[in-house]
Image (cartoon, helix red, strand yellow):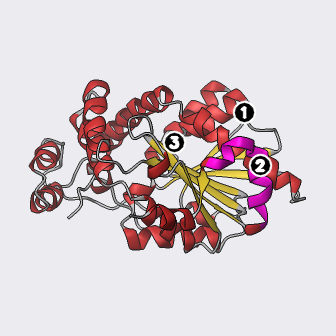
């Protein structure tokens, strides 16, 4: 079985209402042990629980906020904001060129502490006609993201809930480090939900699936993350990364044109840690390539993977 991330297991919520559900420490420990993950089981066994063995919600929330604060530092070092703007800027240029009326809405799915949305708001990297919204199923992370945005005086907002059930739909969906949380069948459903929405495009960055990724993740998280949970989940996330073929096949379920930026066979595995999969309404591909200029050569569809196969 693929490795599991502890952060996915120590919180639970009712999908219909968002109400928090109790999580029993022993059940999580047993699940991790059954998956052969003794390291993760030891970490969870040390987390605070009440007399009934239910993980203490306050302690879990503080831990996750702390870990995501460290993840924000990693995002800064990896220049996640600049990487996304390299594609998002031309993407919104293409959307405007096709005559789609504004204002536009960018929705960050699984935003965590909202680093990307807050970075975009702070830098003004996108035009003022793009509303910035972060959405996450974890109420504690959303609350902290909102607090940070208010303290920084930023024009953006954060919502606790389902990104695909907002009263006002996205023009473009984005995410960073979310895709590997989905097993393959659920990944196709994730993309299909975006295709069924009024959204014009999506752009999701995730870990590049290479043989070097788990090694690099272990070294990087060992050096940067203070809590063992962050180190554990960093390695697990790299081991769970989806292949280029899986991403493109799943993205095709959206009904949009699936494209991958810098797929494995054209990228340097020592330098490519993250790369995005995109989905575009068909009429957007030509204007996007025009807006990207020479960089459009690194944007490839499923037909190129077929040609690259041995």
25 relative to 212, above or below: below
Q: Is residue 15 visible?
A: no
Crowding around mark 2 (Cα neighbors within 10 Å: few <14, some 14 to 19, many 20+) is: many
Image quadrant for the C terminus? bottom left
236 relative to 286, above or below: above
- Marks 3/1: CA–CA distance: 24 Å
What range of the chain is rendered magenta? Answer: 283-297
Quarter location, residue 240: bottom left
Q: Main secondary structure of the magenta part?
A: helix
- Residue under label 2, please give it: 92
Q: Is residue 147 left or right of residue 291?
A: left
- Residue under label 3, please give it: 143
Q: Would you say the residues marked 3 and 1 are in contact, meaning their CB atoms lie under 8 Å apart?
A: no
- Counting from the top left corner in percent of width and height, residue 308 is at 47, 61
Image quadrant for the N terminus? bottom left
Q: Residue at x 48, y 71 (%)?
A: 188
Look at the image and say whether residue 20 sits in the magenta stretch: no
- Counting from the top left corner in percent of width and height, residue 277 is at 55, 56
- Counting from the top left corner in percent of width and height, residue 272 is at 45, 39
- In the foreground, 292 or 97: 292
- Residue under label 1, please give it: 125
Q: Which mark is residue 75?
A: none
Task: Give the secondary structure at mark 2.
Answer: helix
Q: Would you say the residues marked 2 and 3 are in contact, meaning their CB atoms lie under 8 Å apart?
A: no
- Marks 2/3: CA–CA distance: 29 Å
47 relative to 179, above or below: above
- Marks 1/2: CA–CA distance: 11 Å
Task: Give the secondary structure at mark 1.
Answer: loop
Q: Earlier in the sequence, mark 3 or mark 1?
A: 1
């Amino acid at each position: 079985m693929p490795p599991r991330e502890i952060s996915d297991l120590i919180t639970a919520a009712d999908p219909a209402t968002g109400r928090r559900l109790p999580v029993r420490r022993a059940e999580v420990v047993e699940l991790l042990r059954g998956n052969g993950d003794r390291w993760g089981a030891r970490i969870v066994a040390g987390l605070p629980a009440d007399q009934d063995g239910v993980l203490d919600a306050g302690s879990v929330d503080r831990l996750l906020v702390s870990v995501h604060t460290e993840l924000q530092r990693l995002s800064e070092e990896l220049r996640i904001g600049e990487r996304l703007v390299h594609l998002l800027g031309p993407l919104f240029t293409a959307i405007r060129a096709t005559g789609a009326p504004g204002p536009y809405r960018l929705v960050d799915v699984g935003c965590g502490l909202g680093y990307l949305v807050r970075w975009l708001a702070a830098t003004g990297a996108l035009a003022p006609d793009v509303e910035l919204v972060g959405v996450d199923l974890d109420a504690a992370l959303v609350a902290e993201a909102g607090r940070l945005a208010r303290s920084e005086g930023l024009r953006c907002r954060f919502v606790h809930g389902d990104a695909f059930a907002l009263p006002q739909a996205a023009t473009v969906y984005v995410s960073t480090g979310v895709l590997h949380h989905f097993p393959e069948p659920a990944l196709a459903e994730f993309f299909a939900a975006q295709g069924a929405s009024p959204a014009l495009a999506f752009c999701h960055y995730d870990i590049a699936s290479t043989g070097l990724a788990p090694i690099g993740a272990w070294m990087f998280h060992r050096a940067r993350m203070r809590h063992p949970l962050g180190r554990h989940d960093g390695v697990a996330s790299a081991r769970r990364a989806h292949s280029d073929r899986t991403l493109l096949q799943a993205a095709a379920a959206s009904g949009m044109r699936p494209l991958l930026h810098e797929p494995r066979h054209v990228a340097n595995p020592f330098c490519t840690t993250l790369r995005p999969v995109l989905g575009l309404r068909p009429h957007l591909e030509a204007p996007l390539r025009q807006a990207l200029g020479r960089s459009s050569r690194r944007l490839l569809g499923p037909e190129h993977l077929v040609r690259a196969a041995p």
